[in-house]
Amino acid sequence: MSHTLKFKPKNKYEWNQDKKFVYVQIPLPAHTSLKKVDIFLSDLILKVNSLEKNQVHFLDLAHQVDFKSPENKFVLSNGLFHATLKKKEADLEWQNLLVEDLLLE
């Protein structure tokens, strides 16, 4: 007998986009300083780690970003982490921020 397990993580982020950029907002614990946030960005991964509160957000992006672009920006304001990520393919409209649900059989 075969079972399919469907795992869907809770969305603890918000996002939107325009033709050139993807904008991601992630809540972090109150009073977190950007100096205490470890940020990793690659073409398909955004990882945000709050070192003060041991909280990690790992986003497996659905499409590539230009992770070496100087136009990428990271700001922390009032407990909300804002990432501005330059799309690798400008004008590509993303239907999802993340890779589809993980399916295990």
Image (cartoon, helix red, strand yellow):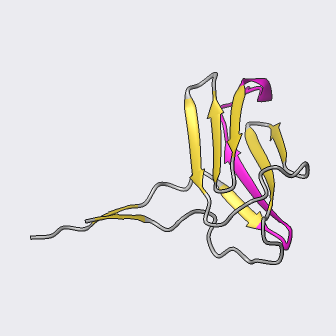
Foreground residue among 96 and 88? 88
Query: Residue 65: x, y in percent?
Result: 74, 60
Which residue appears farthest toward the left when viewing the image? Answer: 1
Residue 35 counted in the magenta span: yes
**Image quarter of residue 81:** top right
Image point (50%, 68%), residue name: 100
Counting the numbered discs, the total is: 0
Examine the rendered structure and indicate whether residue 87 appears above or below residue 42.
below
Image point (80%, 38%), residue name: 76
Residue 14 counted in the magenta span: no
Query: Residue 99: x, y in percent?
Result: 54, 65
**Image quarter of residue 77:** top right
**Quadrant of the image for the C terminus?**
bottom left
Q: What stretch is highlighted in magenta?
A: 17-36
Image point (78%, 29%), residue name: 34
Q: In this view, does 71 lie to the left or right of 85?
A: right
Examine the rendered structure and indicate whether residue 18 appears above or below residue 71.
below
Foreground residue among 27 and 96? 96
Image point (25%, 68%), residue name: 4
**Image quarter of residue 14:** bottom right
**Quadrant of the image for the N terminus?**
bottom left
Query: Residue 78: x, y in percent?
Result: 79, 37
Query: Residue 36: x, y in percent?
Result: 72, 24
Examine the rendered structure and indicate whether residue 61 appears above or below residue 32.
below
